[in-house]
Amino acid sequence: MPDDALAALFDADFLARLARLRLAVRRRLLGAGGEAPIASAGGGRSEFREHRPYVAGDDPRTIDWNVAARLDQVFVKEFTASGDLTVRLRVDVSDSMDVGTPPKRRLALQVAAALAYLALHQKHAVRVELWTPKAQLVSPPISHVGGFAAVLDWLRRRPAETPGASRSPARGRARSLIFVLSDLLDDALVREVALLEGAGADLCLTHVLAPEDLDPPWRGRLRLTDAESGERFDCVVGPDERRRYGRALEAFLESRRTLAARHRAGYLVCSSAQPIEEVIFDLLRREGRLTERS
């Protein structure tokens, strides 16, 4: 990510607004032994924050049946991430993420940086996981506020740039809040969602698409190039082709929403043209991933 993109993002006003938020978890997270942790006053576990109505994808174990019986409506207990939590930022940096105006990769990395800033200030460990179909680069846990510069350094890398780096994401039973930031075009990354959820983590899929993905501006005779394979092909785009594309796009988005629901993950869609402030302060808050500090 270019340095100027970060400099423009992390100004005093943005950081002041960010400091008023905190990360929240939607699922009760499992500890190293596979058990759900017990909240403690010391802040080392997931702490109860509030009740809210149940939505599809919520962990049934968080349902408060006493409240449901009294109010005749299903509510879940919402917990705030605190203490011994690892926030994993799994960012797709494959070639397709360089497509768009602006590129999808730019927004994905900016959102990851903002989430890392929040996590470190809540004293959580952060792990950067850069993903491509052929290679992966995983940082060691970064767990202190002064480590934000290290997070930015990792986010600027590409997996092929560091010989000998880890090629697979950290799994295991550590309590994790995982943000996947991707255009979700590659089936290999989609298949990993089940593995990530299976480790007992709380998972959020942030689906980043380009304006050109959502509403292609092209018409007439075209020569297109596949961003991943480099393959070129000729086509003609008219009204019928645009309608077929619209139906295919809706089916694609629905498949990703279904994927998230199946694995009890949060899901939100954003355009790479959206301001970072809108993604952080609107979309992620509406998804319940960020809440106001009390």
Image (spheres, rainbow, N blue to C red):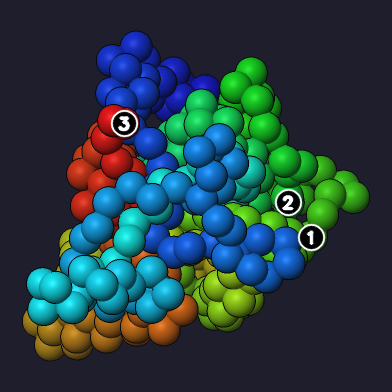
Amino acid tagged 3: Arg
Q: CA distance from mark 1 to mark 2?
A: 6 Å
Q: Which residue is mark 1?
A: 167
Question: In the drawing, what numbered circle is on residue 210?
Answer: none
Question: In the drawing, what numbered circle is on residue 137?
Answer: 2
Q: Is residue 218 left or right of residue 136?
A: left
The x, y position of residue 65, in whole percent, is: 28, 76
The x, y position of residue 14, in whole percent, is: 31, 21
Q: CA distance from mark 1 to mark 3?
A: 36 Å
Q: Nearer the viewer, residue 96 or 286?
A: 286
Residue lying furthest top in this view?
Answer: 12
Amino acid tagged 2: Leu
Answer with the quarter of the image where residue 9 lies.
top left
Going 90% across and 50% down the picture, which residue do you hit? 164
- Residue 229 visible in the displayed image: no
Question: In the drawing, what numbered circle is on residue 293?
Answer: 3
**Secondary element at tag 3:** loop
Q: Is residue 27 left or right of residue 69?
A: right
**Secondary element at tag 2:** strand
Going 43% across and 27% down the picture, which residue do you hit? 5
Disc on the earlier residue, 1 or 3: 1
Going 30% across and 70% down the picture, which residue do you hit? 64
